[in-house]
Image (cartoon, rainbow, N blue to C red):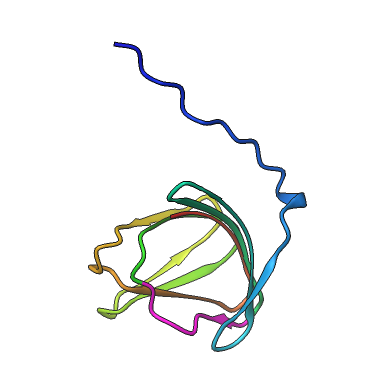
Amino acid sequence: MKIPALPFTLTDWSHVQPTLHPGETGEARWRTFAMGDMRVRLVEYSAGYLADHWCDRGHVLYVLEGELHTELKDGRRFVLTPGMSYQVSDYGDAAHRSSTATGAKLFIVD
């Protein structure tokens, strides 16, 4: 049985136009690429950013730069630094929101 080839896409993120997403405080700049039902983002949070919502969507998130604070709706809190990641399902079992005092740059697949 031959496995079909998957689509291959090369992304030069410097050519992907950013979109601005205000937080409760600060802002996020997303560079987004979508292929089928997969979304890939390069996200930069400004210093002082706090998400304006609790997110139930599943992600694989990898910290490229800065320090990211992740709060789960059940009260748990985590600090991620460059080279760290988290993986969360989209079944609503780990609603989360992000913040950063210093700013952060992330690579996210959802």
Q: What residue is at 40 percent from the left and 21 percent from the top?
A: 4
Of the pair 110 and 87, the residue shown nearer to us: 110
Q: What residue is at 70 percent from the left and 49 percent from the top?
A: 13
Residue 98: image location, x then y, percent: 47, 74
Compared with 63, 21 (above or below) is below
Q: What residue is at 36 percent from the left and 73 percent from the top?
A: 96
Q: Which corner quadrant holds the N terminus?
A: top left
Residue 56: image location, x then y, percent: 33, 70
Main SS, magenta region, reads loop
Compared with 88, 5 (above or below) is above
Residue 92: image location, x then y, percent: 25, 69
Q: Which corner quadrant holds the C terminus?
A: bottom left
Q: Check if residue 51 falls in the magenta segment.
A: yes
Q: Is residue 77 left or right of residue 101?
A: left
Q: Is residue 108 left or right of residue 101?
A: left
Outermost residue, right side: 15
Of the pair 68 and 34, the residue shown nearer to us: 34
State which quadrant residue 73 falls in.
bottom left
Residue 43: image location, x then y, percent: 60, 62
Q: Check if residue 100 falls in the magenta segment.
A: no
Magenta segment? 48-55
Outermost residue, top side: 1
